[in-house]
Amino acid sequence: MRTDPERRGQGVATRILDHLLGDARGRQIRRISLETGSMEFFAPARALYAKAGFVLCSPFGSYTEDPNSVFMTKAL
Protein backbone atom coordinates (compact mmCIF):
# COMPACT_ATOMS: atom_id res chain seq x y z
CA MET A 1 0.00 0.00 0.00
CA ARG A 2 1.46 3.35 -0.95
CA THR A 3 0.09 6.81 -0.25
CA ASP A 4 0.76 9.89 -2.36
CA PRO A 5 3.42 11.94 -0.55
CA GLU A 6 1.05 14.93 -0.38
CA ARG A 7 -1.54 12.79 1.45
CA ARG A 8 0.75 11.02 3.92
CA GLY A 9 -0.11 11.40 7.56
CA GLN A 10 -3.80 12.00 6.85
CA GLY A 11 -4.95 8.45 7.64
CA VAL A 12 -5.74 7.43 4.06
CA ALA A 13 -3.95 4.06 4.24
CA THR A 14 -5.43 3.31 7.67
CA ARG A 15 -8.95 3.96 6.39
CA ILE A 16 -8.39 1.76 3.34
CA LEU A 17 -6.96 -1.04 5.47
CA ASP A 18 -9.84 -0.74 7.96
CA HIS A 19 -12.32 -0.96 5.08
CA LEU A 20 -10.62 -4.05 3.64
CA LEU A 21 -10.53 -5.79 7.02
CA GLY A 22 -14.19 -4.93 7.64
CA ASP A 23 -15.14 -6.30 4.24
CA ALA A 24 -13.21 -9.51 4.95
CA ARG A 25 -15.00 -9.91 8.30
CA GLY A 26 -18.33 -9.37 6.54
CA ARG A 27 -17.44 -12.20 4.18
CA GLN A 28 -16.56 -14.37 7.19
CA ILE A 29 -12.91 -14.60 6.19
CA ARG A 30 -10.98 -15.80 9.23
CA ARG A 31 -7.42 -14.83 8.33
CA ILE A 32 -5.71 -12.21 6.18
CA SER A 33 -2.08 -12.68 5.16
CA LEU A 34 0.11 -10.34 3.17
CA GLU A 35 3.54 -9.99 1.65
CA THR A 36 5.40 -6.70 1.63
CA GLY A 37 8.96 -5.56 1.07
CA SER A 38 11.76 -5.97 3.57
CA MET A 39 13.65 -2.83 2.52
CA GLU A 40 13.58 0.41 4.51
CA PHE A 41 11.28 1.94 1.88
CA PHE A 42 8.53 -0.42 3.12
CA ALA A 43 9.00 0.36 6.84
CA PRO A 44 5.92 2.65 6.98
CA ALA A 45 3.76 -0.10 5.45
CA ARG A 46 5.07 -2.70 7.90
CA ALA A 47 4.38 -0.30 10.77
CA LEU A 48 0.83 0.27 9.51
CA TYR A 49 0.17 -3.46 9.32
CA ALA A 50 1.69 -4.09 12.77
CA LYS A 51 -0.45 -1.31 14.25
CA ALA A 52 -3.51 -3.03 12.74
CA GLY A 53 -2.59 -6.28 14.48
CA PHE A 54 -0.68 -8.12 11.79
CA VAL A 55 2.21 -10.27 13.02
CA LEU A 56 5.17 -11.81 11.23
CA CYS A 57 4.61 -15.26 9.79
CA SER A 58 6.18 -17.82 7.49
CA PRO A 59 5.65 -17.66 3.74
CA PHE A 60 2.21 -18.88 2.70
CA GLY A 61 0.60 -20.15 -0.47
CA SER A 62 3.17 -20.41 -3.25
CA TYR A 63 5.56 -17.92 -1.60
CA THR A 64 9.01 -19.06 -0.47
CA GLU A 65 11.56 -17.46 1.83
CA ASP A 66 12.93 -14.36 0.13
CA PRO A 67 15.24 -11.73 1.64
CA ASN A 68 13.23 -9.03 -0.14
CA SER A 69 9.91 -10.08 1.40
CA VAL A 70 8.22 -9.86 4.79
CA PHE A 71 5.17 -12.02 5.45
CA MET A 72 2.49 -10.98 7.93
CA THR A 73 -0.85 -12.39 9.02
CA LYS A 74 -3.86 -11.44 11.14
CA ALA A 75 -6.65 -13.64 12.49
CA LEU A 76 -10.07 -12.03 12.14
Image: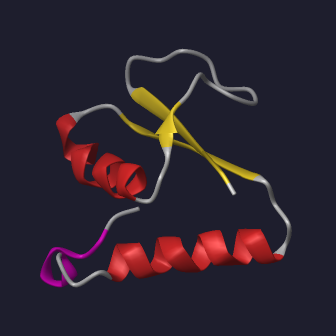
Q: Quadrant of the C terminus?
A: bottom right
Q: How is the image coloured?
A: secondary structure
Residue 52, by quadrant, is bottom left
Q: Nearer the viewer, residue 35 or 23?
A: 23
Q: Which residues are magenta?
A: 3-8
- Left or right of residue 36, residue 61 in this image: right
Task: Give percent across and percent down for residue 6.
Answer: 14, 82
Taking the spot 48% from the left edge, 38% from the top edge, the residue there is 55
Task: Give percent across and percent down for residue 37.
Answer: 37, 37
Residue 32 within the segment the image draws in magenta? no
Task: Give percent across and percent down for residue 65.
Answer: 54, 15
Q: Nearer the viewer, residue 66 or 44?
A: 44
- In the displayed structure, would residue 30 be above or below residue 5? above
Number of marks in the rendered image: 0
- Left or right of residue 55, residue 74 in this image: right
- In the displayed structure, would residue 57 be above or below residue 54? above
- In the displayed structure, would residue 74 be above or below residue 4? above
Taking the spot 50% from the left edge, 70% from the top edge, the residue there is 17
- Left or right of residue 46, residue 22 in this image: right
Residue 1, by quadrant, is bottom left
Taking the spot 22% from the left edge, 84% from the top edge, the residue there is 10
Task: Give percent across and percent down for residue 28.
Answer: 85, 66
- Left or right of residue 76, residue 27 in this image: right
